[in-house]
Image (cartoon, grey):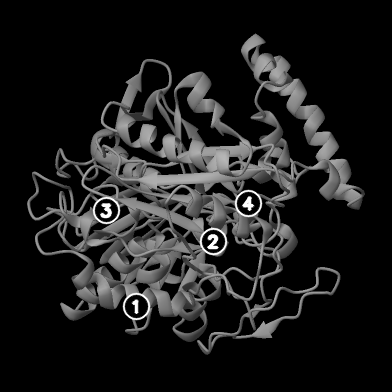
Amino acid sequence: MPRLEGSSSDVIVIGSGFGGAVTACRLAATGKRVVIFERGPARTGEEFPRLGARPSKWLWTSRWDGFFDFRMFKRIATLTASGVGGGSHTYANVHIRAPERSFRAGWPTGLGPEVLAPYYERAERMLGVRPLPESIALEKTTAYTAAARAIGAEAFRPNLAVYFGDGVKPNPDEPPQYVKDPYNLGIDVLQSPCRHCGECDLGCRFNSKNTLDLNYLAVAQQRYGAILQPLAEVKSIVPEDGGYRVNYLNRHNGLMDEAWAPLVVVAAGTVSTNELLLRCRDEYKTLPNINAALGRNFSGNGDFLAATVNAKEPLNPWHGPTITLAVREMNDEHHFYLEEGGFAPDLAFFVGAVKPRSQYARKFIRGPLAYAARLKWFYREVARLTGDNTGLEQELPANTMIFLGMGEDGSDGRVSLKKSLFRGYRLNIDWKHDNTRALIDRMETQLKLISKELGGQYVANPLWTVMHKLVTVHPLGGCGIADDPEDGPTNSYGEVWGYPNLFVADGSVVPRAIGPNPALTIAALAERTAEHIVQRGF
C-alpha cells in the first residue's frame, strides 16, 4: 500500500460501506481530493472464502484480515463485514424504505420519510434495486407465499440490489455471461445476471450483487479520482491545524502511518465507529469533548434468527438470492418484518447444528468440544459434497427455511469501553432483553405458525435457546443524530457536536431501531449528509 502523496487530502473517509461509499462518491464529484481508508482487503470472484478456507480468511481479528467480524458480548453478539464495499458483500441485498412509524421517537425534528424521499431515490437508482422478477419461480418463494397467506399475512417481494438481467433464471450448466456497465453509470465494471446460487451472504463470485465496489466506489475512483486504500485500519483521530490527523495501521507491513485532512467522515460501521470514537475520547484523549451521549441507544434492529426444518416439501434454500420475500406486521404494539432466507451449501453445516432432537443439541449441552467435533464431521461431509457435487441436493437439508426477523427493539443498549488490569480498554455492549422480549415473543409466535404451515419444525437460534444471547447483523446507534447534544453525539447531519467538519455517516447515526433492513436508510442519510457538506460550501 503506497503512502499518500504529501500525506494530506481534502477529505478522509474512514470505511467503505454504505455510509462511506456514498459520502466518498458525492464529495469526490465536487472535485475534492478524497481518500478512503478501509481496514479490510478488496475481494472479487474466487477471493471470497468458501468452505475449507483457513479461519484467517473467514474472520477479521487484530491479526487476520478475514471476511467477517464476529464479536461476542454478554447478551448480544454482532456479525459485521470487513473489506472494500463493507457489508454490501455479506448482506442479503434487501432495500426497504423505513415507514413513517420508524421516525416517531428519537429522531431529529421533522426528519422522516418525506424528507428522506429524494435521498432514498438517489440511493435506489445508484444501487439498481428491483424485486425478484415475477417470471422467476423458486420453491422457497412459492412455499413462503402460501404459508404467509394461510396465517392471514401477505408476503411481498422487496427490492433487491441484484442484477437479474432479462429476468430469466440462467442455466447453471452454462458459464456466466458478463455485461459491461449494465446500469449505465459510465464506469468500467462487468456483471453477470444472478446465478441463483444462494451465496449472497458469502460474497458473490459472479458480480451479480450490486455491491458498492460496482457503483458508488467505482464511480468515486474511476470518474472522480478518489483514492481507496485497503488494509488501512484507523486507530485514532487528532484535531490538528484546523483539521484532523488520522493515524492508521498499514496492515500490509504492520507499521503506523498518518494522513491529514480538513474534513473527516467516520463510516467504519456501527461497532467499529463507536469503538474508534470511544477510544479517542476515553483512552487516547484526542477527542475529549465528545459528549456523554456517545454509545447510547445501541440497537440490534430487532434481529432474530430462526429456522424451519423437516418441512413437508423440498424448499431448496440454496436456489435463488438469499432473501426474496418479506412479511410485515405493523400495528400499535409491534412493527417487524419476517423474511425467508436461503443459504449456500457451504453454510449447510450450521443448519445441521440446529436440527431439533438430534445429536447436535445433546452434544452441545454435554460440552463445547464434543459439539465442535460433530461440526467438524459435518464440515468434512459438506466439503466432500461441494467438492464434486455428487448427491449434493439429495444429502443437504433441502427441507429447511431460514428466517430473519427484524423490528423495533428496545434500542436501549450502551456501547462503552471497560478497563481491565491486564488487557487495557476493551469494547463492551451492555444489552438487556427486557424491552425487546415482547417483540421476540410475537415474532416467534408468527414463525411457529408459518413453520406449521410448511409442515416443519420451528427452531430458534441455539445461541438464544441455550445461552439467551441474540445475534445482530444490523447493529445501529451509539452516535445517533439529534437536535440537541444531550440527546446524541452528532447533529441532524451527523456532524459531531464540538468538532467542526468531523462527521459520522453509517449505521451508528441511526438513533433507534427502524424495523426493516437498514442499508437503504443508512445510504439515504449519507446522501443527505454529503449534500449538506457540499451546500455549505466546503
Q: Position of residue 459 (x, y in %)?
A: 57, 31
The amino acid on which the numbered mark 1 sits, given as a three-letter code, is Glu
Q: Which mark is residue 84?
A: 2
Kindly state the secondary structure of the residue where label 1 is placed: helix
Q: Is residue 530 left or right of residue 168?
A: left
Distance of mark 3 from mark 4, alpha carbons? 30 Å
Question: Callout 4: few (<14), some (14-19), or many (20+) C-alpha neighbours within 10 Å?
Answer: many
Q: Is residue 271 left or right of 325 when viewed as pictured?
A: left
Q: Which residue is mark 3?
A: 509
Report how far apart the C-alphas of labels 1 and 3 lie in the structure.
20 Å
- Disc on res. 504: none
Residue 381 is situated, as x and y percent measured from the top left of the image, at 85, 36
Q: CA distance from mark 4 to mark 2?
A: 24 Å
Q: Out of 287 and 461, give the one closest to the viewer.
A: 461
Number of the front mark, 2 or 1: 1
Q: Amino acid at mark 2?
A: Val
The three-letter amino acid code for the residue at tag 4 is Gly
Point out the residue furthest to the top here: 366
Frontmost of labels 3 and 4 is: 4
- Give how far across and how far down residue 58 sits, in percent: 65, 44
